[in-house]
Image (spheres, helix red, strand yellow):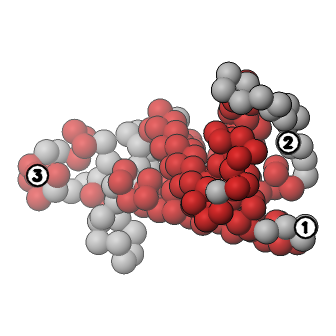
Amino acid sequence: MIPIDGDSVNGGRSTEASGYASDDSRTPGDSGRRSAGRAILWGWLLCGILDITSAIVISIANKGSPIRMLQGIAGAVLGPVTFEGGFATATLGLVMHFGIAFTATVIFYWLSRRIPAMVEWAVPSGLLFGVVWLLVMYRGVIPLTIALRTLYLANVKRSLPALWPLPLLVHMTCVGLPIALAVRRFGPWPRGNRAA
C-alpha cells in the first residue's frame, strides 16, 4: 500500500478501511472515476456491440440477412412467427441480444468481486469466461428456451447450435475479453487486490 493521509482520501476513512489506496482507483486520464457502474456500462456496450457486429459479419458472409439474423434471436421466444414481424421482431432480437450482454457483464463483475484474480489476470479470465458463457448459452439457455417453447408452440425445432469453431472464438474475443478488460479498466479494484 502507498502511504497516504487517511483524512484526505475516502472521506476521512483510512486507506486500510477502504481496501485500497487512492491511486489504486486511478489511471492517467480517468480522474479517479472508477465505479461498478462504469465498468458494467463499458463492458456491456463493448460486448454487445462487438458480438452483434461479428454476428452481422458472419450472417452477411454466409449470404444471409442481418435483419433475419436478429429475427432469429427473437425467435427464441416467438418461434417461427418471428420472421413475419419485419423490423419489429428484428428490434426485439437486438434488445434481447443486449439484455444477454448486460447479464454476462453483471455476472462477470459479480464474480470478479469474489475472485480478484479475474481482474488481475483480465485477459485469460476473459477468454475463459467467454468459453463458460458460450456453454451457458448454447447448452443451458438455448435448450431451456426450446423446452419452454414447446409449452405454447407446435413443431418446435429441437436442434442445438454447434460450439466450434466460430462460436467459441467469437465468445472468447467478443464477449469474455471485452467484458474483462472493461471491468479491469473502469471498475474499482476488488478488496485485497491491487494493480501492479
Amino acid type for the residue under numbered disc 1: Asn
The residue to which callout 1 is attached is 62
Q: Residue at x 47, y 33 (%)?
A: 114
Which SS class for mark 2?
Answer: loop
Up-down relation of residue 29 to residue 24 (above or below): below
The residue to which callout 2 is attached is 161
Residue 133: x and y in percent read 68, 41
The answer to whether residue 159 of the structure is visible from this angle is yes
* Front residue (pair 26, 139): 139
Q: In this rendering, which labeled residue sits more in front, label 3 or label 1? A: 1
Q: Residue at x 61, y 65 (%)?
A: 87
Residue 175: x and y in percent read 66, 54
Q: Residue at x 77, y 29 (%)?
A: 154
Q: Measure the C-alpha gap from mark 1 to mark 2.
A: 16 Å
Amino acid type for the residue under numbered disc 2: Pro
Q: Measure the C-alpha gap from mark 3 to mark 1.
A: 57 Å
The residue to which callout 3 is attached is 11
First in sequence, mark 1 or 2: give its number: 1
Residue 174: x and y in percent read 69, 60
* Front residue (pair 78, 144): 78
Label 1–label 2 contact, CB within 8 A: no
